[in-house]
Amino acid sequence: MKAVLFDFKTAKEEWFDHAVATYTKKLNPYIPFEVISLKSSKSDRDDALSKKKQESEDLLKKITNDDYVILFDEKGKDLDSIQFSKQIEAAQMSGKKRLVFIIGGAFGVSDEVKNRAQLKVSLSKMVMNHLVAETVALEQIYRGFTIIKRIPYHNI
């Protein structure tokens, strides 16, 4: 199984690029992992619905029936790190070829994307910057794999 995280990054920040590179490198011994940034235009609140629709359509074109999809969504399930690791492990046992993580754009994702996801997970009840949310997601994905592999990283 391979894993990918799809995002809609608009800003270029050195600290974030470093975080992505760091967690990608840390994850690759456990699962082939990559982050794929899909095209996103600047946030335009007047055109939020059409932007969300277009981004969601672009995203759905990248997902196949052989993908197990986990969507990070503010209305998703509240899981602790151990519960999240169990969900990752279940996804690995699902027979799917790829584990897909999704972080939507500034205005979220369409209902079609939400319905396509086998699991929707909330990172926090707090609102946070998109780049911070993605960094938290990457860390939790890494933490999940270290829990599964019993690597000393997560302190219980």
Image (tube, rainbow, N blue to C red):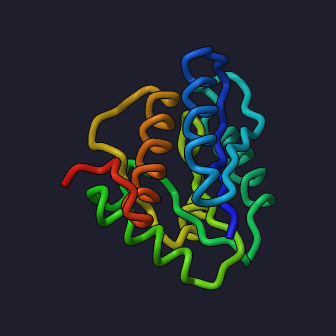
Q: Residue furthest left?
A: 156
Number of marks in the rendered image? 0
Specify whether 6 is left or right of 85.
Answer: right
Q: Residue at (39%, 56%) from the top-left corner?
A: 151
Tell which of 147 and 95 is nearer to you.
147
Rendering coords of residue 55 (x, y %):
71, 45
Rendering coords of residue 69 (x, y %):
59, 66
Tell which of 101 and 92 is nearer to you.
92
Task: Check the picture and name the quadrant holding the N terminus.
Answer: bottom right
Q: Residue at (63%, 32%) from the top-left corner?
A: 21
Rendering coords of residue 127 (x, y %):
34, 33
Task: Check the picture and name the quadrant holding the C terminus.
Answer: bottom left
Q: Residue at (62%, 41%) from the top-left corner?
A: 25
Tell which of 41 and 81 is nearer to you.
81
In the rendered view, would you say 87 is above or below 141? below
In the rendered view, would you say 119 is above or below 42? below
Specify whether 41 is left or right of 52.
Answer: right
User: Image quadrant of residue 19?
Assistant: top right
Tell which of 53 and 118 is nearer to you.
118
In the rendered view, would you say 96 is above or below 115? below
Q: Residue at (64%, 85%) from the top-left corner?
A: 95
Q: Residue furthest top?
A: 14
Rendering coords of residue 16 (x, y %):
56, 23
